[in-house]
Amino acid sequence: MTMVREKNYWLETVSIPAGDPGPLPATVDVAVVGSGVTGLSAARLLAKRGARVALLEAETLGFGASSRNGGMVLTGMKLPVATLISRYGHDKVRRMYAASLAAIDCVEQIVREENIDCNFSRCGHLEVACKRSHFDGYAEGAALIAKEFGHRLQVVPKSELDKEIGSPIYFGGLVDEVSAGLNPARYIAGLAQAAGRAGASIFDHCPVQSVMRESSHGEQRFRVQTAKGSLHAHDVLLATGAYTGGATPRLRKKIIPIGSYIIATEVLSEELAHALSPKNRMIYDSKHFLYYYRLTPDRRMLFGGRAAFFPETANTVRQSAEILRRGMVHVYPQLRDTKVEFVWGGTLDFAFDSMPHTGRIDGMYYAIGYAGHGMAFGTYLGSKLGAIICGQPNDLPFEDIPFPAPPLGLRSGHTWALPLAGAYYRFLDWVS
Ligand SMILES: Cc1cc2nc3c(=O)[nH]c(=O)nc-3n(C[C@H](O)[C@H](O)[C@H](O)COP(=O)(O)OP(=O)(O)OC[C@H]3O[C@@H](n4cnc5c(N)ncnc54)[C@H](O)[C@@H]3O)c2cc1C
């Protein structure tokens, strides 16, 4: 373990473009805050539609979760479909599920149109059952999804699971062929270049410090104060995910920032990689405190999980390397002697109800709360909100659902109760 580099492996595969060196424009149509998939996808769309756009990023481009994640572009949402239907009703959930499928098409279309070299592939995802009872629920879940949405999932019994995964520990699986995988840092780099080509001005190292509403000649606009000066914007789109901070305190209160950590091994032989994941799926297990894993395009095993619930610090990242290595060897005993070369962490955007949300807060647009489905939803909702700001009707199914705030103790900046939440989820995994 001494050789592990505390570094995001994906950033070794691409150089992230720098922002514009010039001064901020005095006035724009839209200021987009945050340069993850949501912000970049929105900025690209807005610029293509002819809007004057300034994208403002506090750190380097894609600094947040978008360049650090598992690169899984997944169908569906975090919550089971039956739970969604009982909460929101059939019609609404049909539209939500359709949005989740359209989101994957949206990623694919952008990758094609902009020629983004990010190893996008419709490799499908595999959920693996950690308990027999979890597997027993798969057939019913797949039947409900087929009936409600006409979308086919494939239930894989234990006897056939070796065609999908080289691990003996699971009770069966569920495959969705529509999901995809990509290299997230290369995707971010390509999206940033595409937004720039379309005419968006992109500023890195430019934290937004406050946003004030103003009225000028009877028209409402925003004054956006940043560390590099201020600008006026007709509209503001907040795309700050789990990294939402004090500049937008009302949105910050809505989000639970959850730490997630990933290790990447040394490059594996072709035979071993094939034995671990014969169909190169995006894989995750059925627990609350789940593991997610996949092969990288250069054949490393990338293995992630919530080793600690806290947002990442040097300490949690270091501890995670060994916790995740043990988890990986439990799943794949074949990797007992394989070196782990990278470990890193990031912070996920969770709403208290585990749902994506779009809307307006203090007059500013936002899209947030993707709960592990941000590569697809962030791309899609960013583009959709861009189009809505340009005047397209708002038909988003996440717009008018309740957006409950988490209790203090789970909120960004006050996360003292997160270990309790972690313990609660471990308990659920034990009993259910
Ligand atoms: C380890 C890990 C693994 C994950 N795996 C997957 C996966 O496999 N598939 C999947 O779909 N999702 C995954 N996710 C979740 C996914 O990465 C996120 O949902 C998604 O990237 C959120 O995108 P975003 O653009 O909304 O926000 P982010 O990518 O988090 O970007 C927000 C940006 O806003 C900036 N910002 C914040 N405040 C300000 C300010 N005041 N001024 C200027 N800029 C500001 C931040 O610096 C940051 O760069 C994972 C997340 C993590 C952490």
Image (cartoon, helix red, strand yellow):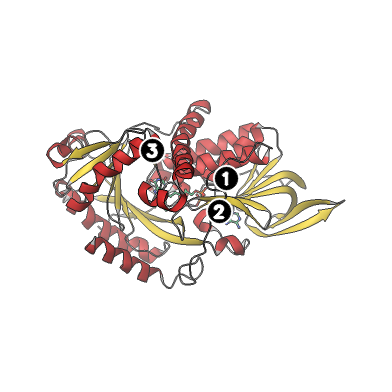
Q: Quadrant of the N terminus?
A: bottom left
Q: Residues within 10 Å of mark 3 (few under 14, many from 20)?
A: some
Is the CB–ligand 1 distance for label 1 below 8 Å? yes
Is the CB–ligand 1 distance for label 2 below 8 Å? yes
Question: For this view, does 380 lie left or right of residue 317?
Answer: right
Q: Amino acid at mark 1?
A: Gly
Label 1: which secondary element: helix
Q: Residues within 10 Å of mark 2 (few under 14, many from 20)?
A: many
Residue beneath disc 3: 148
Q: Is residue 174 above or below residue 131?
A: above
Question: For this view, does 270 lie left or right of residue 226?
Answer: left
Image location (x, y in percent) of residue 280: 27, 35
Q: Nearer the viewer, residue 309 or 359?
A: 359
Q: Amino acid at mark 3?
A: Glu
Residue beneath disc 2: 240
Q: Which mark is residue 66?
A: none
Label 3: which secondary element: helix
Q: Nearer the viewer, residue 97 or 38?
A: 97
Q: CA distance from mark 3 to mark 1?
A: 32 Å
Image location (x, y in percent) of residue 11: 43, 45
Q: CA distance from mark 2 to mark 1?
A: 8 Å
Label 3 close to label 2 by CB (< 8 Å): no
Tell me if residue 201 can be seen.
yes
Q: Which mark is residue 39?
A: 1
Label 2 close to label 1 by CB (< 8 Å): yes
Q: Quadrant of the C terminus?
A: bottom left
